[in-house]
Each structure stands twice: as structure tokens, then as C-alpha cells.
Image: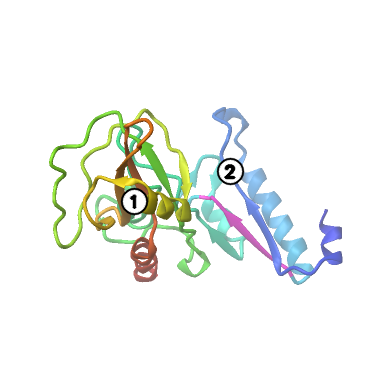
Amino acid sequence: RLADLGRITIAGVNIDLEHFSRNKSTYDAPALTSLICDIQEALHARGLRLHSQDTGVYGSYANFDTLSLSKCMDFVLPMGYCNPQSATIAGPTIELDALRHDFVRHKDNKSNPGRRIWPMPPSKIILGLPFFGYNFQCLNSAPVPFPTQPAGGGPPPHCKINDSFPMTDHFVCMQLYRTQKITSGPGIGFDPVKGSAWFEYKNETSGKRHQVWFEDPRAVHAKSQFAFNAG
């Protein structure tokens, strides 16, 4: 209850707007926007701010009218992760190019793909980035010998998967790298196009090939730099 907020010391409230229902008959974007605006008004009366996360940053996302919602939000925090681009090939939790697509080159902007098209002020957007990864068990074998990576980095050989994305903490990824039999050559690979780090290992118990994608400092820097350049 809003009345209870005066009993604790906080700077504001964050509302997680998720899209669950596929039944479009239940969508009521105006009612949701009205509710959010009423909440913001009540919070501002108490000197508090209202944030939201997981809303799209352009047009209409599911049952969210993001433009109208943004007018009643002090900040919007789109979550730039848990969005793998393929259900059959291993990859990072979020690709750098997917961020460009969502924030700059959306499909509705084909006539001018370099122009920003989000309807809300960039100053209201705080991009959420990951610091974890995925540990995939591959259905196919790696090429022999394992391809040598170019000096500027590159992607690993395709790892076919069965629509499984087992999330792995960043520090667990590093522990795997230190303790498992690494089969992808020396060091940790980095894909500059996807903006994420990776390595492969062979599970000594099952003998299965694994490909790990995760966010290391290089990945976080690449995606943070994108956000900085995007304004």
C-alpha cells in the first residue's frame, strides 16, 4: 500500500512490467497507463520516484503503450538480456546487434536505419546489462582441429542445441574455465559482432562438448559503449 511507504526510507518504487498473457482480449493499455500515472502522482506527492523495467522502448510492446507509459515514469529500465537470438544455435544472453536493432535499427525504420526511433527521451532510459552467461551442451561435435581465432576475435563453431538455455553465474563460468578441459585453444574467445565472450570444454564425466557464452569486462564495455554512443 502507498500509505505504508512513509514508514520506510526509500528513494522510489520500481515496477516490473512483464508480458505474460497471449490472450489479446485481456490487453487494456489505456487502463494500465492510467494506473501507472495515478501511482506516479501518489509517489511524487510523497517525494518518491517511479521506475519501470522490462517495458519495450519503442511503439507498442504487447499490451504496453510505451510512449504513454514513459510520460508517467521518472526512469525506464529495459532489460538488455535473456534474449538469445536462436533456439537452435548457442549464443549469448543478448547480442550487441540485437541492442542496435531494439534501440536504433528497428524494422519499422527501414527508410532510415541509422536514426533513433524510440518515442521516449533517451535521458529517461537506463539500460540493464547482464553479468552472467549460458552453459550449453552441444548436440554436434566441434571441428578438428579447432579453428584458430583471428587477432581481433571471432565467433566459435556452431554449437547445435535443443532449445535449452541453462543460465550460469559469471563466476561459475570462470570456475569452469579454470577447472575443465578447455578444447577451444588458449584463452577465452571474444566475438566482437555479438559483443560477448565464449569458450568450449569437454565434460570429463559425460564426454560431451560444451560451449559457454558469458559477459566478461570486454562484453560489458562493448554494450555500455553502445548505450553511451546511442545517447
Q: Amino acid at mark 1?
A: Glu
Name the quadrant containing residue 23: top right
* Amino acid at pointer 2: Glu
* Residue at position x 49%, y 70% in the image: 123
Q: Image point 74% across, 68% down: which residue? A: 10
Please identify the quadrant where the C terminus is shown: bottom left
* In the image: residue 21, left or right of residue 196: right
CA gap, disc 2 and disc 1: 21 Å
Image mark for residue 18? 2
Query: Residue 95 shows which numbered tag?
Result: 1
- Name the element at disc 2: loop
What is the secondary structure assignment of the residue under circle 1?
A: loop
How would you rate the neighbour count of disc 2 (Cα within 10 Å): few for under 14, some for 14-19, many for 20 or more?
few
Of residues 102 and 185, the one nearer the viewer is 185
Instruction: Based on the picture, tell me whether residue 113 belongs to the magenta stretch.
Output: no
Q: Is residue 57 visible?
A: no
Stretch of the chain drawn in magenta: 48-55
Which one is nearer the viewer's eye here, 129 or 6?
129
